[in-house]
Image (tube, rainbow, N blue to C red):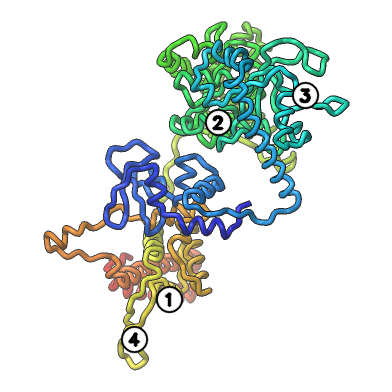
Amino acid sequence: MIAPDAIQRVKDAVRVDEVVGEFVALKRKGPRYLGLCPFHNEKTPSFNVSPALGIFKCFGCGEAGDAITFLQKHEHLSYVEAIRWLAKRYNIDLPETEATPEQQLEHSERESLAAVQRFATEWSTAQLWDTDEGRRIGLAYFHERGFRDEVIRTFQLGYVPEQGAAFATAARAQGFDPELLEKAGWIKRREDGTAWDFFAGRVTFPVHGLGGQVIAFGARALRTDKGPAGGAKLPKYFNSPESALYVKSRSLYGIHFARKAIADSGICLLVEGYTDVISLHQAGIANVVASSGTSLTEDQVRLIKRYARQVTILYDGDPAGIKASLRGIDLILAEGLGVKVVLFPDGEDPDSFARSRPSSEVEAFLRDSAKDFLVFKTELLVKDTGGDPVLKAAAIHNIVESIARIPDQVLRQLYIQQCGRLMEVSEQALLSEMNKVLRRALRKQHGPLEAPEAEVPALQAPQPPPVAIKGTAAQERDLLRMLLNYGHQHIMVPVRTEGGETREEDYTVAEFLFELMALDDILFDEPLFKEIYLDYRHAKNLGVEVEAGRYAGHEQTDWRHLAIDLLTERHLLSPNWKERHRIHTVHERDILIDAIEEGVDILRERRLDRMLEALDERLRGTAVPDEQMAILREKMDLINAKLALSRKTGRVVVG
């Protein structure tokens, strides 16, 4: 783990304009910078960077944050990866906090395994390019597959000679422990302890992690003879075993090379094998990853979800393979991602199709052939029923199981309607069946006694909107905006002494606001505004110097987004008004006392409104004359107080 003080040193050193400026062309405009937003297409700059506050904000699409969140969004890094990127950028050491013995052991093993895989990558690529056997067998195989040299180098493809222990010998010479080499999957040991290369006579496909480091290997046999240790014929593909460095269910082949293209397009193409990924990359289609022949897992889907809104699955046309994978696709639906399917012509797969056609034709085919998964599944299963009612009922149950996995209720309803038409089944029958599926899922999750009845309502006529209730959200937001922008600023506040004289006292804006709010025990109604206000007040009471960055870089997303919105001004006053036209403009910071007093007075008025509403409710609920008179006297006092406030705020009191 990175030590907290080291993270703080990184944050203190970072200049958001320098970081953003490495990816976006920025032009200075007064105290801030402007540029074209990298998160959406625009022609007029609306992307603002404020070095003073350490934040960015796009007024076009709403994206906002600090340097860390910019890197997370733009480069699709995790928080820790962004910290490490910034530490490298600003030459800051990142010492790790003292870990438990178990954590130290795991960290040490991960580092050792990573060192093995780095060495193995360099060694196997050298064998491919620099040896006669590698060029004659390994490189020739890749060329036969149609892979160009630059693509082979990009994916760091390699070769392991057939000598039986070439890698084991080379690795031992570099000081690697045989036990570690076996954990990494590179060697096996016979009963007498001698080692042999597990990947001997195979070409290798390194599996890269998100950051580009090699975490595992896949290897393909080029011959069909028996393994070095004797015994049965070896399978075509071998993969590294799972380890502290590599968990197969959390990894996707090609994700390091694909993640930016996936994020840019919002679509992840999902294929089965290594060569499918490489061939599509070579055809200029980079947003593609492979599940490496395993059933899709929740962790893999969640990894895709970090970058994509939609998954398009590329099938090679084998009906048995398609049906076997249908269940796993429900995991994608459950994560709220859209799913489409592309079916290749008979005898073709993504690899062969991409190698035999121009890139433009491949792109057009993928675009034009993509079909909604649930429609595809419905047509596929209905076709297999042959009109048999029992088989059709089973198909309906299967399809409803998939629709029920979709978290969006409106989308579920639309699919129910569409699949009902395709299967010639009433919408109500499908809804009823889906309710059963949802209830079973809830019972499984919560137990039979606690699970509420899950209902999927049919489409209903729109209900009239609720009657609007008067609130003070706008005033609360404005007061919080002034607190975050000017809370530290000093103002001279006129104060009346006991002798009736007036003198000016030095307050900060925060102290002045807190005092005005405390006079009538007023607090914000909006929960989020209230949380930040109370946090600021509590910190101030403890003597902490509160800066806007406390909230602009806060770990709570809703606090951070609100703070950035409040701290970022959409427009700045042009100096031309005064310098060229001699027109004097009044800035808010020059009238803070009046602005804060007016905002607090409006909150007082709203509190009086609520008290008056409560008195009206009490008046309607009693027929006792004395109680009615007492309530009316209270109401008159409140109306008088409200009239006094109205004279200050300029608001008209009605009723």
Residues 410 and 576: in front is: 576
Disc 1 residue crowd, few under 14, some 14–19, many 20+, Cα 10 Å? few
Rounded to the nearest angstrom, the CA distance separating label 2 from label 3 is: 31 Å
Location of residue 523 with respect to 38 vertically, above or below: below
Secondary structure at badge 2 equals helix
Secondary structure at badge 4 equals strand
| Residue 279 visible in the displayed image | yes
Looking at the rendered structure, the kind of residue marked 3 is Trp
Mark 2 = which residue? 255
Disc 2 residue crowd, few under 14, some 14–19, many 20+, Cα 10 Å? many
Q: Nearer the viewer, mark 1 or mark 2?
A: 2
Residues 226 and 533: in front is: 226
Disc 3 residue crowd, few under 14, some 14–19, many 20+, Cα 10 Å? many
Looking at the rendered structure, the kind of residue marked 4 is Arg
Rounded to the nearest angstrom, the CA distance separating label 1 from label 4 is: 15 Å
Disc on the earlier residue, 2 or 3 = 3
Mark 3 = which residue? 196
Location of residue 441 with respect to 517 vertically, above or below: above
User: Whole-percent x and y of residue 578?
Assistant: 16, 62
User: What residue appears at the point 54 percent right and 15 percent down from the top-left corner?
Assistant: 350
Q: Nearer the viewer, mark 2 or mark 3?
A: 3
User: Whole-percent x and y of residue 458?
Assistant: 53, 30
User: What residue appears at the point 36 percent right and 80 percent down from the top-left corner?
Assistant: 506
